[in-house]
Image (tube, rainbow, N blue to C red):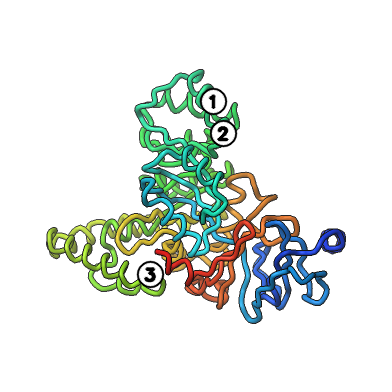
Amino acid sequence: MKNLLLLFFLVASVCMSSQSTPDLIIKDANILSMTNSTVVMNKSVAVKNGKILQIDDFNKIKKDKNCKVIEAKGKFLMPGLAEMHSHLPDENKADTVLLRNVAAGVTHLRVMNADLDQVALKKRLESNDKSISPKLHYSFILTKDNKYTEAQFDSLMLEIKKSGLSFIKLFSIANEETFDNLMNSANKNKVIVCGHFPGSINIEKVIYSGFKSIEHVGGLDKIRDSSALLISILHTKEKEVFNCPTLDWDIMACNLQYPREYKHRLIYYNAPKHYLHRWETEYNKTINETGQEKILATKEKYLPSFKNKEKILKALYENNCLLIVGSDPGGVFQMEGFNMYEEMLNWSKAGIDNYTILKSATTNPALFFNEQDKWGTIEIGKDADMIILRKNPLEDIINIRTIETTILNGNIYKKTDLLKKM
């Protein structure tokens, strides 16, 4: 079977390359395709119209004088990152946030809340080919105020599809009847529902309802009996429910890195100095206003809850459950896009292996959106949304911070150039 697949890709590569020449080649890179944990050394990737045309030795790729070549000898090439839990600010700040994400190597972003009209943003970005933005997966935000019947939800599902929104993000739910109406309609209309765990609903009911992803390990974090927790974890695996832990939100919201550890955050490696100065000023003001003793007391009180979340993440991992990386940035020392690095490092500290972390930031997000045939791996015919790194993140996840180039929609973005625009 493996030989047949290899033959298929070789034939496909020859056929596609014979039909056209690429407009871009990433030359002599070490490729983390994310189809497995193997690094393919010193190969070149040819791109045509934003799609991967060929993966081969550089001298075997047909090219002409108009083809742009990126020299990547000794560097590492992998699929772009997918930030699976991020919020967008108001219209005045949105473009800067989107630019930060691209600078960090984020090529897909799941919008979990927004202070702007997402449909209007979608239209604006689609009408302006100069916009610098990841590929956005837009949401309809559902709250407890939406007490709909199943018929009303059916109408909403049609409007969501018509508007080009990707999913429903559940912020809160009115009651169990509304939840039943929501999930019956969503399953019937094939619309993804994910988000906060609906606290008033039994966790087994949520898992078996078709709910696609649970944020912040909600529901699971309330189970105190270890046997009951394992049963629910195994059921999430059975029903293919994704989990998006967002550990970094807890770390910064509850000052878990105070008073010194926050100085070692990876953001100090990438953020412009004026950003760091502003965050330091804001953070010190908060500490002074709240009081150091109160900050430390709150930290100590919350630490057991955080350790429990780490334990749940490790259990989900050990039982081969579906995981997706989302960093939920918004506080000080949390720069959109770059906060993915912090979250990935948090996972590593919780005992998750590097390949699983990278998979949860690339292939699993594509699987979440049922778009695994389009993106998430480096394979012929897929979107050529990729990142170039100086060091191998499979060896050490901290190397994710060495991303230096993002290739997105046929455009090449240097991190240093984008950071200068901020």
Q: Earlier in the sequence, mark 3 or mark 1?
A: 1
Q: Earlier in the sequence, mark 1 or mark 2?
A: 1
The amino acid pointed to by label 3 is Ala
Q: Is residue 161 left or right of residue 117?
A: right
Identify which residue is drawn at 54% across, 54% down.
130
Label 2's element?
loop
* Residue tagged 2: 191
Q: Quadrant of residue 334?
A: bottom left
Q: Position of residue 87 (x, y in %)?
A: 40, 48
Q: Are marks 1 and 2 in contact (CB under 8 Å)?
A: yes
Q: Is residue 112 left or right of residue 107?
A: left
Q: Give the camera-side residue of 41 and 174.
A: 41
Label 2: how many Cα within 10 Å (few below 14, some 14–19, many 20+): many
Residue 107 against residue 277 in the figure, above or below: above
Residue 104 against residue 174 in the figure, above or below: below
Q: Give the camera-side residue of 230 and 265.
A: 265
Of the two numbered discs 2 and 3 in the rendering, the one whose residue sits closer to the viewer: 3
Q: Which mark is residue 185?
A: 1
The amino acid pointed to by label 1 is Ser
Q: CA distance from mark 1 to mark 2?
A: 8 Å
Q: CA distance from mark 2 to mark 3?
A: 37 Å
Label 1's element?
helix
Identify which residue is drawn at 50% across, 74% down.
402
Instruction: In the displayed orientation, state which residue is furthest to the bottom.
Output: 74
Quarter of the image with the N terminus is bottom right
Of the two numbered discs 3 and 1 in the rendering, the one whose residue sits closer to the viewer: 3
Q: Quadrant of residue 356?
A: bottom right
The amino acid pointed to by label 2 is Val
* Residue tagged 3: 271
Q: Position of residue 297 (x, y in %)?
A: 17, 60
Q: CA distance from mark 3 to mark 1?
A: 44 Å
